[in-house]
Image: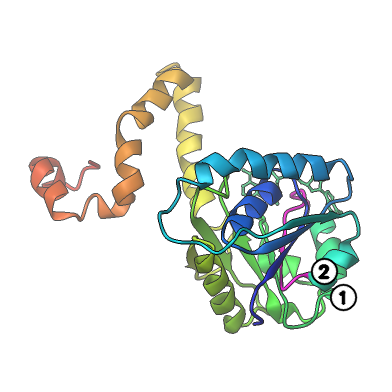
């Protein structure tokens, strides 16, 4: 993969704005493309809004900030970008069409990634030119603060694409997680959905209100999950010692 100096964004809403703020902060130029011209003002506002939080993200010395440009012409964006991140609405047919179009204009060594929350890469890369340079790169909102990005390859994705994408995302301060097999919803949103299903059952059965369920997470396991997650919290030695009985019975802690 080429050295990424300019990140191209297709779609500049919530997620496109987050990608822009993060990349600019780490010294990458951004060319953002959206069908709606009014999104230029929106994305500039989103970048400015992220600035105070980003400034507190790391004490490490950083290169000078990148510059942001905007276009409504997808072709201009695709021809100038060294890496393209697509963030348009979650509709398979629309994404397939737009990804195919971007792939006709972007040089074959330009990686094209999708922020899709649930669609699978094999479906998305179906009509692309050089589909081996495509992968899913699923971030979490707000993208400028949350480091996780799930990388998922489809049937035609080259391993070198995943490796190169991971290198780029690491450079802009992210934590790439390679998902071994494509499944709808990738990994993290499936876990979130499982919790959501239980929330709906508990509310439906009158066991708790939504506010009470939020409290049960915010003031309890939510704090611990941020540091140790679900699985490491039951294997960490101190957690085992602290939970004696429940650990021995394998009950959740
Ligand atoms: N919102 C989240 O929390 C979140 C988190 C992770 C991933 N995602 C994924 O990111 C993607 C974008 O979500 P979002 O929340 O930013 O949506 P959004 O509605 O905020 O933004 C979508 C943008 O795409 C633009 N657009 C529509 N058609 C276009 C086209 N043909 N060419 C160029 N631009 C076009 C729209 O004008 C809009 O500005 C989706 O695939 C979603 O699943 C969303």
Within 10 Å of disc 2 (Cα), the crowding (few <14, some 14-19, many 20+) is many
Between 114 and 167, the one nearer to me in the picture: 167
Can residue 212 be seen? yes
Where does the C terminus fall, quadrant-wise?
A: top left
Q: Find the magenta span and give its range.
A: 81-91
Between 53 and 197, the one nearer to me in the picture: 53
* Relative image position of residue 187 (x, y in whole percent): 50, 56
* Relative image position of residue 39 (x, y in whole percent): 82, 43
* Residue identified by numbered label 2: 78
Q: Mark 2–mark 1 contact, CB under 8 Å?
A: yes
x 19%, y 54%: residue? 236
Where does the N terminus fall, quadrant-wise?
A: bottom right
Which quarter of the picture shows residue 142? top right
Which quarter of the picture shows residue 52? top right
Is 112 contained in the magenta span? no
The answer to whether the residue bearing label 2 lies less than 8 angstroms from the nearest atom of ligand 1 is no
Q: Main secondary structure of the magenta part?
A: loop
* Relative image position of residue 149 (x, y in whole percent): 53, 59
Judging from the image, what secondary structure is the residue with disc 2 in? Answer: helix
x 88%, y 45%: residue? 36
Can residue 127 be seen? no
x 79%, y 56%: residue? 69
How many angstroms separate mark 2 from mark 1 (CA)?
A: 9 Å
Answer with mark 2 or mark 1, whichever residue precedes in sequence: 2
Is 89 contained in the magenta span? yes
* Residue identified by numbered label 1: 104
In this rendering, the answer to whether 26 lies above or below 54 is below
């Amino acid at each position: 993969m080429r050295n990424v100096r300019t990140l191209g964004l297709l779609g500049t809403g919530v997620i496109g704005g987050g990608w822009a703020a993060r990349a600019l902060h780490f010294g990458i130029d951004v060319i953002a493309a959206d069908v709606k011209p009014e999104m230029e003002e929106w994305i500039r506002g989103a970048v400015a809004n992220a600035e105070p939080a980003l400034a507190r993200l790391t004490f490490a010395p950083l290169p000078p900030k990148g510059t942001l440009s905007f276009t409504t012409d997808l072709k201009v964006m695709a021809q100038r970008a060294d890496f393209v991140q697509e963030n348009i609405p979650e509709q398979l047919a629309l994404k397939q069409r737009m990804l195919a179009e971007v792939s006709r204009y972007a040089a074959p060594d330009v990686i094209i990634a999708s922020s899709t929350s649930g669609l699978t890469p094999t479906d998305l890369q179906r009509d692309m030119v050089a589909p081996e340079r495509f992968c899913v790169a699923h971030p979490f909102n707000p993208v400028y603060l949350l480091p996780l990005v799930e990388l998922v390859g489809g049937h035609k994705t080259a391993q070198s694409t995943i490796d190169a994408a991971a290198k780029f995302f690491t450079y802009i301060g992210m934590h790439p997680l390679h998902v071994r097999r494509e499944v709808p919803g990738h990994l993290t949103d499936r876990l979130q959905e499982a919790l959501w299903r239980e929330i709906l059952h508990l509310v439906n059965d009158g066991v708790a209100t939504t506010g009470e369920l939020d409290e049960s997470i915010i003031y309890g396991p939510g704090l611990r999950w941020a540091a140790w997650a679900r699985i490491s919290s039951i294997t960490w030695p101190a957690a085992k010692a602290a939970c004696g009985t429940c650990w021995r019975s394998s009950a959740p802690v």
